[in-house]
Image (cartoon, rainbow, N blue to C red):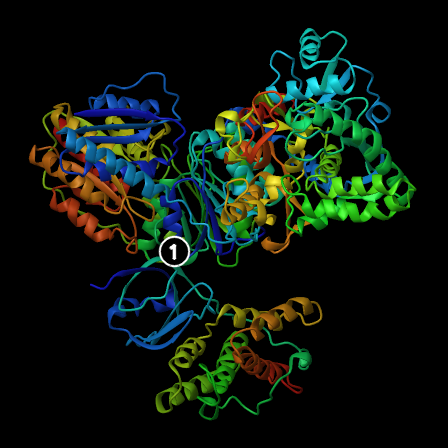
Amino acid sequence: MPPELACAASTLTATALPLAPEWVEAVRTPVSVHYASGDIAAPVVCVATADAVRLPHSVVVAELPTGSFTPRVNRWWTPPRPSGLTAPDPGCWARFAGSEYDDVDAAALLGRGAGLTPDGDDVLAGALVAGHATGHPALPRWRRDTVRALSTRRTTAVSVGMLHSALDGWAAPQLADAVEALCADCAAETVAADAAVAALLAVGHSSGRHLLDGVLHVLNTHPSRQQGAA
Amino acid sequence: MTQLTTPTAVVTAGAELLADAVAAQAVATHRVAWQPPAGDAAALAAVMADRRRRDANERALARMLAAEATLVDVRPASEALGLEPGQFLHAGPPVDWERASGPLRGALIGAMLLEGLADSPEAAEAALASGDGVSWEPCHHRGAVGPMAGVVTPSMWVFELRDAVHGNTSWCSLNEGLGKVLRYGAYGPEVIDRLRWMGDVLGPLLQKAVRAGGPIDVRAIVAQMIQMGDEGHNRNRAGTLMFLREVLPAMIDSGAPTGEVAEAVRFVSANDHFFLNLGMPACKLQTRAAADLPGSSVVTVMARNGTDFGIQVSGTGDQWFTAPANTPEGLYLGSYGPEDANPDIGDSAITETAGIGGMSMATAPAIVRFVGGSVPDALATTQRMYDITVGENPAFAIPILEFRGAPTGIDVTSVVRSGVLPQINTGMAGRVAGTGQVGAGLVTPPMACFTQALDALAAAV
Amino acid sequence: MRHVEVRKGAYVDSVTLMQVSRRVADLDGVDAALVAMTTDLNLELAAGMGFEVPAGTTGNEMLVALAAASEDDLATARDEVEAALAAASRPATTGFGDAPPPLTVRAATRDLDPDGTVALVSTPGQYAFVDALDAVEAGLLTMIFSDNVPVEQEVTLKRRAAETDALVMGPDCGTAVVGGVGLGFANVVRPGPVGIVAASGTGAQHLMSLLDGADVGISHCLGVGGRDLSSAVGGMSTLRALDLLAADPATELVVVISKPPAPEVAQRVRDHAASLGRKVLFGLLGAGQPDLTATAAAVVAAAGGTWKAPQHWAGAVEKVRDSGALRGLFVGGTMRDEASIIATETLGEDQVMVDFGDDELTRGRPHPMIDGSLRVERIEREIDDPACGVLLLDVVLGLGSDPDPAAGLVDAVRRATAAGLPVVTSVVGTRDDPQDLLRQCATLTEAGAAVHLSNAEAAREAVRLVEGATR
């Protein structure tokens, strides 16, 4: 039996953990290792130190494993999942604007761009989380398209893990906080929104920027806020 | 704490096993290396629970940081301190002839000879032992400080420093140099001759210079010397040169004979410790500003007379807490050895009371070997001192610690809880009267001073 | 060959000393080894082991008592003590410019954000006040694991906490879960909607374990100390904990676990709970009150879960030993109290029910959940005592506890059942606890014990055995 590794595990990884000795290492960074788990519910598990961005499908450890291991879960935690929020007035967050998109087109976005999480994947993840949070009517279509794109097109393991979590609205804390802050009262909460957006923009090299673009696209085009909406 | 969140850090004190159980959950632990406190647990609890303590200690620190120290005059002690013939001051807490150490006895004998109250050491000793027409009391009782034996006589000239913010004044004699000198208990003819010259030539010259050149900001010099490798107790080289720079033009302009000016400059620049006697009263002004705050557990005086170590604490006023002084450990001059060293002596621990000296050892790597230490020891020592102080003095910034301020405001409760004693960095006097300096080294106060202070603070709650 | 010495000025915590004692006792040729602080209890223990105990100790020294087969073995044992103590004290290496480890809680908290920082104080009871006060003054969530803390110090800490927005959990708070992080003796539980306020550590552990077994998760479990709801303390921490849970978005339902509070305090707590706008259930531990298992069932129902009766396994001995009485030997105080109430209802007041975690029995010693040796010695004596008819035990799992408590008990249980003495054990733990709940149960059942995941049911089975014999 491989050595035990003390950890704090996201509840999203519960079904994948018993398979840990069989996991396949896919990507290693200085603060995290991403594994293909072989589990359907959590196909990618991110083993990360406390310094890493806390992806929703993470297992937090004091030191990264170098070989095979048996997880010893000493703590369970639930990642954030914003929901039941109301999209803000259109144009409310114009000052955060970045790239604009015509649609959430998973087939066009998936795997597009550079990085551990290609830019298009970040946009897609931001859109899925914001869509879940605000109950966007197009969310079922986006989810379907994303699942299809994931099965037919290649992207990085890091992206697969992130998108898989985002499909159900689970988010890293920085993304979740930004979505919540942007959906709060836009006149009163500007300081909180500035802080949350700044924290999101600090994620990765450009991931935060693209996640935010996906979020803003969903919030700015939300049908509940379009003129003439019922 | 305003809401429940997942902790990012857990501070643990006590069983390691419980800390390990937290670490096993991938949560950062900050483990206290806990030890049972010294002294009475009930007294400690009472002092800690005293509602005045935190505010009083914060005030003590704030007053220390606000204190000024300006050299305003140089004058004879008879004038400045009102010393009458036969009255002497000395370092440390009160002590009688019976219990006085060799170096203090030697310095008092020298004082009798200097003042013309005896014509031989034997006659001086007899008069001192009988107490006939002579008396002595601690420098601290008059707001003054004196290094090593710290003996001040009426005819000696003293620096006069002023803290205008808090309206306090402090005094200290002029430094005689190293080797066979009165403050180390030597009283031979060369010692007395040098003191006479200091009274006749050096003192008046410095007086003219200070009066003509205007007040000198001594605290500003201390702040600079701390960044130049002086810790202000055992190394005062940069401070001495900076002081000389301040007074030199006025000394030259004074109209005194150039031979006298040259002799004075040669004397001061040959004595790396000349500034100690300016740094000490500056430190005394700093700690005195923190005195007499009810409930405060901050130490305001640490002083030794060669027999006893005494401390005073803000919340208990001018009450002394004394215990037998330790003997420093360090390096010896020439053929001297541990058996030649006298227990710790001098008011110079006022520098540590104010956060410099041994407390700021990290800033003086050049002398760590001189006191038998190493550079990592010095760095560790100063960082350790932050555990026992209320705060830091940003005016005395230590470059190697990223300009962290000197650890300032020694807290009695922190000392007894941590078992860490203030680090003092000191010279060593010979045990036998008349010997002079035998070495330099490191020493700490006895813990009993702090546990007594704790009991007194508890009684005053 | 014997060696006894007393060392002054040497302090090591009792758990580490126990580990040192064990390491030395495990050496070949060593008959007995006790390295412990010189508390009365430890001196008695040494005397009981046949050592000449030195007089005039204060309790702050370290006792080293060794017995070995030969001079050489004794020398080896002494070397091992030195090596083990040196390893335990492991001085932190301070490299060039590294800050040395903090020596007080105040120094440790100086640069930390009070919102994300928790303090866990487990220093000896007479000193814990000052360490906890540092944390309270820094505004931290402060858990005091230490027992033997005077009640007036508890009141001072809790009053001060109200001024600094701190929360004092304790003293004598054995368990807490904050945002999923277990503190003290904590079971590994899944996140969920139930927030717990507990004036009983082992009571909280039992409730959490039963809830976890029914797939109902925990948001936070805030211990408040066994005296919080007394009139002296007035429920100060309970009221604050209720406020914090009411403001916590993850908490949907609150449970308060306590012995019956002082009447005026009970009223205040109930009034406050009613004003929170959150459902608050009370699990009061006392005669005529529902037991913890019943409380757990009510919580599961209120949380919308499905309650199943906790598992149990039959024991090897089905009859009580001739005319013997029930003896309960517990590591959990609440386990003891609950069993005692159940036994008293049927069998009357004269039951011997010992809590090995009591203040008196833990002075200068690790808690029995870490070191069960005192209880094992007692079990051995009960086996030889014909007046003992049935043994009732508890085993508590979780982080911080003995990594394999069943292993420590199994020999004694086997001897007891072989001698015809029935053993009934409750096991408190979750599926995720590091000791492996099912393996612990299996080890005990294989040795002949009856095992229950419900402490109340274990007590009832033991009572039934005694009743069956008297009828």
Q: Answer whether residue C459 is visible to the viewer in this image.
A: no
Please state the total of marks drawn on the protein image: 1
When the figure is inspected, residue B342 is found, relative to residue B283, above or below; the finding is above
Q: Answer whether residue C419 is visible to the viewer in this image.
A: yes
Q: Nearer the viewer, residue C391 or C459?
A: C391
Q: Nearer the viewer, residue B270 or A184?
A: B270
Give the x, y percent position of residue B255.
Answer: 92, 42
Give the x, y percent position of residue B118.
Answer: 75, 13
Give the x, y percent position of residue C272.
Answer: 56, 43
Give the x, y percent position of residue C300.
Answer: 37, 53
Q: Nearer the viewer, residue C454 or B65?
A: B65
Of helix, strand and loop, which one carries label 1? loop
**Chain at tag 1:** B
Q: Residue furthest front?
A: B259
Q: Is residue A156 left or right of residue C111?
A: left
Q: In the figure, residue B152 lies in which quadrant?
A: top right
Badge 1: residue crowd in 10 Å (few <14, some 14–19, many ≥20): many
Q: Is residue B180 left or right of residue A156?
A: right
Quadrant holding the N terminus of chain C: top left
Quadrant holding the C terminus of chain C: top left
- Mark 1 sits on what residue? B25
Q: Amino acid at mark 1?
A: Gln
Q: What residue is at 67 percent from the left and 9 percent from the top?
A: B129
Q: What residue is at 49 percent from the left and 87 percent from the top?
A: A120
Q: Is residue B23 left or right of residue B371?
A: left
Q: Is residue B208 left or right of residue A164?
A: right
